[in-house]
Amino acid sequence: MTAADVLLAALGAVALGAGLLVVTTRHVVRAGLWLVVTLGAVAGLYLVLSAELLAWVQVLLYVGAVVVLLLFAVMLTRAPIGASDDLDRVRWPGALIGAGAGAGLVALFADAFHWSRVGLPAPGTAEAIGGAVFRTWVLPFELVSVLLLAALVGAIVVSRPDISAGPRSDSRPDPRGR
Amino acid sequence: MNDKLQLPNLDYAALSPMLILFGVACIGVLVEGFVPRRIRHGVQLSLSLLGLVAALVMVIRQGSKDDVVTAQTAVAIDGPGLFLSAAIIVLGIVSLLLIGERSLETGGAFVAQAAVTANTDADRDQAARTTGATEVFPLTMFALAGMLLFCTANDLLVMFVALEVFSLPLYLLCALARRRRLLSQEAALKYFLLGSFASAFFLFGIALIYGYAGQVDFKAIDTAIQNSANDDILLYVGLAMLAIGLLFKAAAVPFHVWTPDVYQGAPTPVTALMAACTKVAAFGGLLRLVYVGFHRTEWELQQVLGTVAVITMLVGAILAVTQTDIKRLLAYSSIANAGYLLLGVLSVSERGLSSSMFYLVAYGFTVLAAFAVVTLVRDADGEATHLSRWAGLGRRSPLYASLFTFILLAFAGLPLTSGFTAKFGIFAAAIDAGQTWLVIAGVVSSAILAFPYLRVVVMMWLSEPGETTPAVSIPGAMTAAALVIGTVATLVLGVAPSVLIEATEHAGIFVSK
């Protein structure tokens, strides 16, 4: 049992416990804050596994951006700040599916790897990942930007109320005016 | 590490069809910003059509060259990939004609402002008066380019990105129907949520396969299946999750629940695009995945996919009998057809590949023609899709009723239509592969499926037209062109299928590098 093993187990326990609190707490805001703990612990796991860049991206994107967005959404909408009873849905189906998926994954990985030890790969530094992204994965990387553009256009189309309001006329326009 | 970053070798000629389409989509976004609203629709439409034609030319030029795998292992431009790309582009051109049509309804089939609350005065006002959003053209181009990439993706990661690139615009397009806004919004949300769920499965499957093979490109996965020391359980669970993601897009039972609602709620031209092009893309991806990456798990695959195929064919056919809405009927028919296509996929032979590709093209043209007719049968409130409204249509407008009868007979698989040739090819390939019991299930489900088609035919010709039977609109030039192309292709592929069959056989097999 090395120090890395102990750290992994501890961080995993923190992530799991905080994750449980996210879904059981009655306060929307507290759920968001517990999410910070969960995601932070997962970032810690990445660090222990020597994937530095991934860990910092996790902190920046998930802990930083996503959770802040979530808290803003709570503040901007008229969501209740205190404890609210209607947060809870029927618990059994959710617990069953969550526990089932978790147990299934544990069984799958235990069966697949039989407790064998796997050596750590080369550290995931920014340099290594940047090289991989722009060498091996340059095409999918560029395509993701296309996807984002499509999503932007789509978001404008479905949400902005004053866009592309065509010329209004009381008479029917020329039927051949395509 | 080198100081200078070495970029991978990109074969721009081979990638040009999808690059052209992505380029046209980006120009389309700029057109939205800079071209005056009055002429925007015409500019967008001609730009998109030009882009598709240019992409088709580049695909055909590439057809005479050798197979290439470019951008490291990301994209494989080979015979079947080019054939499927050409099919998507041609079917895309026909769907674009339907999407661009504006003479049937003031302002076209799309809503101007999707954010206006449904069933309010503002909503009714804009449905009656405003011209539709022209952003649908760039979105369609993004979707079509994503489909091209999906058919030629040579590793799982590119495949996932392509899946998202073509799905996201389709989710959005579903929400833009001019009439029956609530139904349209519900369809889009349902498609989006279930689609994201399926994508998550696909992504998890990629992770498990990566855990098994250590690579994500198909050739490496194939090698790993041959001599990996890892436990096969990772492979099978991963493959099952990949299959869930793909079968969702292909609308196979039990991942089909979204299909009828989305087909019904989406604007009819978009439904036509989904039924024709998405089907080609989904099965193109599935074919490459099975034929290149996982053909060594053939035995297990045939068990599972065979079961899915039987359920899909039977459930699609039986539920089609109970439908009362023409768009839902066509949706269930599309589900049953996904079952027939699965027979071609699980044959895992050269013949299975060529007959599946023939089927995809034949079905695509027929379904486009079918939805073109659906856009024409309308009254003051938009399309009349309830089947009772189609009663006596043969008396009101014999021409369109005859056309639709011919299309339905093609769906039912009568000789002298493309439906017969296509089904015959698929069933023959499956028998070659020793899947006789699947073919028996296929024939039984075809017989069941003929019933709802014939019921519509009987309704159109033998019932008296009621007061609510709408007149058929005179189609604009573009809908007429789409209808003619679809019907003529259905007839020609039934009478003289040899040209296309030769093309599918000439396309050869997937490259494995």
Image (cartoon, coloured by chain):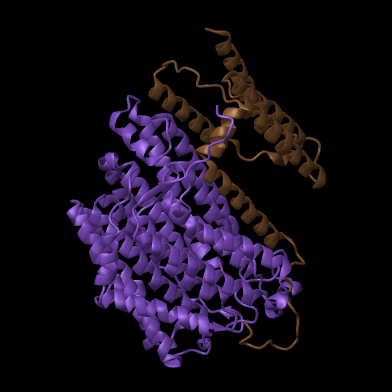
Chain colours: A brown, B purple
Say if residue A32 shows up in the picture. Answer: yes
Number of callouts: 0
Q: Which image quadrant: the N terminus of chain B?
A: top right
Residue at 52 percent across and 90 percent down: it is: B467
Q: Position of residue A173 (x, y in %)?
A: 68, 86
- Residue placed most toward the observer, B507 or A27: B507
Q: For this view, does B349 lie left or right of residue B35? A: left
- Residue placed most toward the observer, B157 or A157: B157
Q: Quadrant of residue B2?
A: top right
Q: Quadrant of residue B501?
A: bottom left
Q: Position of residue A33 (x, y in %)?
A: 74, 30
Q: Is residue B409 above or below residue B231?
A: below
Q: Residue furthest top?
A: A1
Q: Is residue A9 above or below residue B409?
A: above
Q: Position of residue A115 (x, y in %)?
A: 42, 16
Q: For this view, does B377 lie left or right of residue B152? A: right
Q: For this view, does B159 lie left or right of residue A8? A: left
Q: Which image quadrant: the C terminus of chain B?
A: top left
Say if residue B325 shows up in the picture. Answer: no
Q: Quadrant of residue A61?
A: top right
Q: Position of residue B204 (x, y in %)?
A: 48, 37
Q: For this view, does B112 lie left or right of residue B505? A: right
Residue at 50 percent across and 61 percent down: it is: B144
Residue at 45 percent across and 18 percent down: it is: A118
